[in-house]
Amino acid sequence: MAKEKSDTVKIATLAIAIAVVAVFTMIIKIPTARGYLNPCDVAICFIAYTLGPVTAGLSAGIGTALADVLGGYPQWALISFLVHGLEGLVMALIMKGDSVSWAKKLIAGALCMIIVAGGYCLLAGAFLTGFPTAVAEIPGNLIQSGVGVVAGLALSEAVRKAYPPVRSISW
């Protein structure tokens, strides 16, 4: 019975995390040449630092893709799913464990920024915008993901300190 309750809480947490990522993606949109910048990485990084690889990977991928479809950018949905899903998964895998060093946190943050900027550049360049436009959007994507890393980590540290049982719903 306890395992069933635990799984139910994890599934409910995943659903809420997907919604949070979608809202963070849609709430503020800063237009770019072919898409938009948004604060989704704040939510993704918080979830990755706090709730584990399954929740981070799925909520990041599904939440951003859902926001793209609902927000009028359906052509970006698959790229967002892949890039942000990988971002959340990789960050959470690096951050897995109860006591994580600042070196691991910095590595996770740097990889997040590389995955977002590089992933959008490669995939958008190849399939949507062409490489000149995709390369021009690298600075914006680095800023977006960098802000997400810093704010997501700060929020996660505060929540984990204020509510230690949050670790029990990591998945």
Image (cartoon, helix red, strand yellow):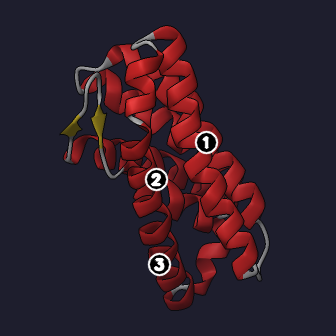
Q: Are marks 1 and 2 in contact (CB under 8 Å)?
A: yes
What quarter of the picture does the N terminus occupy?
Answer: bottom right
Q: Amino acid at mark 1?
A: Ile
Q: Which mark is residue 154?
A: 3
Q: Which one is nearer the viewer's eye here, 155 or 170?
A: 155
Q: Is residue 126 left or right of residue 38?
A: right
Please state if 28 lies on the left or on the right of 91 as rendered: left
Residue behind mark 1:
115
On the image, the x and y values in percent for residue 28 come to 20, 47
Residue 145: image tag: 2
Q: Amino acid at mark 2?
A: Ser
Residue found 39% across the figure and 14% down from its top: 129
Amino acid at dot 3: Ala
As drawn, is 45 to the left or to the right of 139?
A: right
Q: Are marks 3 and 2 in contact (CB under 8 Å)?
A: no
Give coordinates of residue 146: x percent, y percent.
Answer: 46, 59
Q: Tell me how far mark 1 sits from mark 2, CA to CA.
A: 9 Å
Task: Give the structural element (helix, strand or loop) at label 1.
Answer: helix
How far apart are the alpha carbons under marks 3 and 2? 14 Å
- Quarter of the rendering containing residue 93: bottom right
